């Protein structure tokens, strides 16, 4: 194998270094060659980002005969040093909101569901503290990570109580009175100031390390190598920090991608240039040397679960030729929130069938209004997305999910899938021959509007940059071709940049026919369906207004006149699901059907 000059420079380097590696640049190969070039007696630790990366790394190091390399994740190290030592019992799924409320016997102030809102913030405060490098809860201000105005007001009112109960729950874990969570034993490991007995420590995916993980790494005496891609940081919501920017090690670069060709590289660079719109950004140059011409593995990639599910629904209901599909990760994870509530629970609440609701938190809600109030005060994005799906599809959901699952293949049959579906977070590190980007990412137009806003100083630039990173990560998953909606293509990309605009009848035909090698295909359809929550709300501007007697009367009259669901949806500015739900509630089908 012929190595590039950039790779050779890294392999022959000395001292602590950091490697900024673009997508598909062979960073794993480089790290393996770096380890191979060290003295055979050297004790080397390779810190992987997660378990799947760890297993793959173990295999690769063994194939090269590097038995002196120990492969771990930060959590596996912490588990061995903390859980075994203290004989803790680990709760793998974490504590649900209602469980925290019960464990701490939380009290509200008469406000609806106050104890559950408090419990939700306690869970988030624990995650914030455990992932930080701070020694005590009081060293952090939880309000720093609360952005919604209603949530901020609530947390400010209950701050002392939330902080006190957060400490109490952590104390219960520490004493072994209750099961501990993964974040807890990693934090306890960091606070124990561990000494890792290695000559070299290689830290992969450094851009998504938590401050706690970074603190452990930096305190070691070993020669340290941190590897990552500044522009692939997409876990800020999990309190990750870009470790490459937090260290003052000598910087090396891997700027050649062997995954895709130069036209895909150009698209990726232009998307990253959007960072210039709101803040200073030093342009990155990527050389694309990929030569793959296959179109076997195809994937649909989305920013959100909502966008992905809507696109999957489109495929299973409209594209009859697609017989086998696959979702990266567990298929059920796309229909369940982290809290445990399912789409079916939200649907049953929508239909007033509370007795059928399984999740205790949702079961305690009287109606959608109460759930939406809870969401506003907790910033629970996943539940908000589920509400949007229920509003859009209503009682069609069970049959739709059944149809999706009937076409879904198991993990060991993934190669049979004609289309793979994934959010960007779940496909990190993956690559496909051809990809289709769902229209739920940030756009250049939105960034320009943000710049014009008078409140531009209040913008969280880190969050905006992470949104741009998500699109960059998505487009760089392809080895060959990409279908991307028109509004996501940077305006600065022209025909001179080798963009091939193809006028094709449908997306399905785009995928079924032979796509030109290494092309970027822009959507040219005049009516591109949008999948962002913001756009759905804009489209159905009456969706959150209560139904009045006058509106009910108007709906009844129009229903009796035979106006179809689509036109009723347009007239009232609500989703088709919301119209069907109201028709059912007013029993119009039984009375006038």
Image (cartoon, helix red, strand yellow):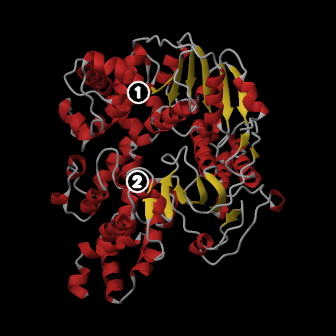
Badge 2 element: helix
> Relative to residue 270, is residue 220 drawn left or right?
left
Pointer 2 or 1: first along the chain: 1
Q: Position of residue 493 (x, y in %)?
A: 77, 56
Q: Examine the rendering and report whether any part of residue 220 can be seen.
A: yes
Numbered badge on residue 411: 2
> Relative to residue 346, is residue 58 drawn left or right?
right
Q: Residue at x 67, y 35 (%)?
A: 21
Q: Residue at x 36, y 47 (%)?
A: 375
* Quarter containing the C terminus: bottom left
Q: Quadrant of residue 457?
A: top right
What residue is disc 1 on? 75
Q: Position of residue 529 (x, y in %)?
A: 55, 68
In the image, residue 584 sits, relative to residue 500, either above or below, namely below
Q: What crowding class fits label 1: few (fewer than 14 Cα within 10 Å), some (14-19), or many (20 or more)?
A: many
> Relative to residue 433, is residue 220 drawn left or right?
left
Near-viewer residue (45 or 336): 45
Q: Nearer the viewer, mark 2 or mark 1?
A: 2
Residue lying furthest left = 355
Numbered badge on residue 109: none
Q: What crowding class fits label 2: few (fewer than 14 Cα within 10 Å), some (14-19), or many (20 or more)?
A: few
In the image, residue 239 sits, relative to residue 550, either above or below, namely above
CB under 8 Å between callouts 2 and 1? no
């Amino acid at each position: 194998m012929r190595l590039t000059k950039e790779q050779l420079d890294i392999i022959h380097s000395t001292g602590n270094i950091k490697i900024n590696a673009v997508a598909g640049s062979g960073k794993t190969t480089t790290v393996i060659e770096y380890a191979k070039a060290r003295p055979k007696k050297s004790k080397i630790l390779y810190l992987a980002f997660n378990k799947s990366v760890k297993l793959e790394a173990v295999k690769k190091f063994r194939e090269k005969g590097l038995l002196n390399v120990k492969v771990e994740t930060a959590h596996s190290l912490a588990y061995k040093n903390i859980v075994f030592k203290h004989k803790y019992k680990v709760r793998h799924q974490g504590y649900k909101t209602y469980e925290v409320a019960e464990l701490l016997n939380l009290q509200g102030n008469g406000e609806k569901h106050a104890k559950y809102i408090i419990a939700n913030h306690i869970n988030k405060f624990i995650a914030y503290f455990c992932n930080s490098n701070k020694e005590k809860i009081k060293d952090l201000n939880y309000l720093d990570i609360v952005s919604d105005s209603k949530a901020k007001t609530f947390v400010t009112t209950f701050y002392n109580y939330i902080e006190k109960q957060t400490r109490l729950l952590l104390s219960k874990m520490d004493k072994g009175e209750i099961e501990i969570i993964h974040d807890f034993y990693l934090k306890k490991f960091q606070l124990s100031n561990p000494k890792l007995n290695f000559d070299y420590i290689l830290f992969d995916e450094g851009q998504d390390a938590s401050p706690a993980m970074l603190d452990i790494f930096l305190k070691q005496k070993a020669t340290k190598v941190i590897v990552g891609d500044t522009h692939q940081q997409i876990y800020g919501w999990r309190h990750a920090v870009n470790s490459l920017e937090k260290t003052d090690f000598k910087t090396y670069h891997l700027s050649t991608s062997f995954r895709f060709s130069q036209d895909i590289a150009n698209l990726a660079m232009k998307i990253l240039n959007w960072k210039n719109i709101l803040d200073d950004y030093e342009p990155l140059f990527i050389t694309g040397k990929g030569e793959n011409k296959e179109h076997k593995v195809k994937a649909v990639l989305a920013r959100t679960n909502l966008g992905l599910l809507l696109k999957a629904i489109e495929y299973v209901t409209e594209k009859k030729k697609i017989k086998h599909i696959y979702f990266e990760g567990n298929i059920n994870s796309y229909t369940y929130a982290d809290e445990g509530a399912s789409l079916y629970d939200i649907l049953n609440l929508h239909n007033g069938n509370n007795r059928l609701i399984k999740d205790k938190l949702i079961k305690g809600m009287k109606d959608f209004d109460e759930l939406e109030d809870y969401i506003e005060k907790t910033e629970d994005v996943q539940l908000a997305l589920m509400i949007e799906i229920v509003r859009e599809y209503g009682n069609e959901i069970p049959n739709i999910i059944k149809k999706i699952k009937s076409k879904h293949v198991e993990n060991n049959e993934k190669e049979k899938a004609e289309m793979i579906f994934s959010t960007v977070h779940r496909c990190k590190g993956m690559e496909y021959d051809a990809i289709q980007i769902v229209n739920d990412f940030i756009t250049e137009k939105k960034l320009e509007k943000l710049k014009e806003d008078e409140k531009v100083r209040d913008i969280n630039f880190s969050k905006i940059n992470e949104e741009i990173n998500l699109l960059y990560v998505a487009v760089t998953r392809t080895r060959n071709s990409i279908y991307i909606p028109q509004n996501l293509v940077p305006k600065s990309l022209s025909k001179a940049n080798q963009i091939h605009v193809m006028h094709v009848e449908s997306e399905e035909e785009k995928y079924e026919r032979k796509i030109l090698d290494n092309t970027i295909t822009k959507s040219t359809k005049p009516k591109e369906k949008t999948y962002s929550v913001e756009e759905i709300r804009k489209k159905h501007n009456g969706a959150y207004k209560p139904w009045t007697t006058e509106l009910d009367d108007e709906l009844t009259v129009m229903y009796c006149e035979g106006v179809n669901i689509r036109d009723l949806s347009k007239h009232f500015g609500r989703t088709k699901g919301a119209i069907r739900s109201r028709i059912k509630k007013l029993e119009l089908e039984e009375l006038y059907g």
